[in-house]
Image (spheres, rainbow, N blue to C red):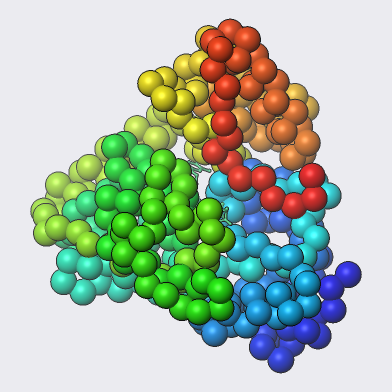
Amino acid sequence: MIDARLFEAVFSPDKIRLDEPMSAHTTFRTGGSADIMLLPSETEEIARAAEICGENGIPYCIIGNGSNLLVADKGIRGAVIKLGRGFSKVSVSGCTVAAQAGALLSSAANAALKHSLKGMEFASGIPGSVGGAVCMNAGAYGGEMKDVVKEVKVLCGGRVKSLSNAEAGFVYRSSRIMQEGMIVLEMSAELEEGSYDEIKALMDDLNERRRTKQPVDKPSAGSTFKRPEGNFAGRLIEEAGLRGFSVGGAQVSEKHCGFVINKGGASSSDIIELIDIIKKRVFESSGIMLEEEVRKIGEF
Ligand SMILES: Cc1cc2nc3c(=O)[nH]c(=O)nc-3n(C[C@H](O)[C@H](O)[C@H](O)COP(=O)(O)OP(=O)(O)OC[C@H]3O[C@@H](n4cnc5c(N)ncnc54)[C@H](O)[C@@H]3O)c2cc1C
């Protein structure tokens, strides 16, 4: 049990939640409770939350929109610092879009559209926060965060620092930010002037492709696995004969085999068991070992 009083000098009561069910904060809609969740809305609050946890030996993790997370059914011992609505300002100046970590990536992409700036169309349908997307180097349809990010403001060892694109160390679905446990506070993306109608048409087309090809109406965390070199996880899973295969409420999507979905009533244990079976069966049929893209957190 964590003593909430530790945080009361910094956080107003509405920003502290005890025993918070993580199923309400993940797009998989699974997972047990976090001992405590903090909802900061200022950089100072984020820094103090991390500091208080450090001083008191409380493990903590940062989450955004929970769209790439698998939280243990036993929950999370420690604190979850959620960067969301309260830390979500987006602004545009010239060709630069600046966004706080808790802003939805779609809000940043829509701000770019409003100012006829091109380059972020790929991001408009990714249901993550700016912080999660930068940390994961999220990408789709040939674009990645690393193509647009100019600068990232992070909290690292209790200090606010600015990282250039190169310093952020973006690689496929990861970054130096993730590897070194930094906290993304804000990013600025450098875009190009374009035509509003063309940007809008491309966004609409990409979002339509998502709707027709992906199970966006079912709880999931997007692509469950990273794309293996020279192949596609979905194709390998299909070739292993696993389309529609399920464990409890977890299922390989009939619509897109690269997605494990919660078809109703799944636990995180169901999802993990299914992931293990997929990895084993794909390895047996193709010799390729899939690697999870989804991030597991909590007491597994
Ligand atoms: C239907 C669907 C479609 C998807 N399509 C795509 C797609 O096309 N491309 C793609 O790349 N992904 C896709 N995803 C996955 C997901 O949306 C992305 O990975 C997204 O970037 C995760 O952002 P988030 O805010 O939800 O992060 P979370 O899931 O909350 O966290 C993910 C990771 O980022 C870390 N993190 C979050 N915020 C911060 C921060 N401020 N500072 C430091 N670390 C942080 C967390 O600790 C965790 O390790 C999809 C998911 C769904 C459900």
Q: Position of residue 184 (x, y in %)?
A: 47, 66
Q: Quadrant of the C terminus?
A: top right
The answer to whether 150 is drawn above or below residue 74 in the figure is below
> Residue at point 56% right, 46% down?
68
> Residue at point 74% right, 65% down?
59
Name the side, left or right, on which 297 lies relative to 204. Answer: right
Between 110 and 154, which is closer to the camera in this rendering? 154
Residue 177 seen in the figure: yes
Q: Quadrant of the N terminus?
A: bottom right
The answer to whether 108 is drawn above or below residue 252 in the figure is below
Name the side, left or right, on which 78 lies relative to 133. Answer: right
Name the side, left or right, on which 85 lies relative to 74. Answer: left
> Residue at point 63% right, 51% down?
26
> Residue at point 51% right, 16% down?
236
Residue 132 seen in the figure: no
Between 9 and 152, which is closer to the camera in this rendering? 152
Q: Position of residue 156 (x, y in %)?
A: 52, 71
Count every numbered label the image shows and give the total.
0
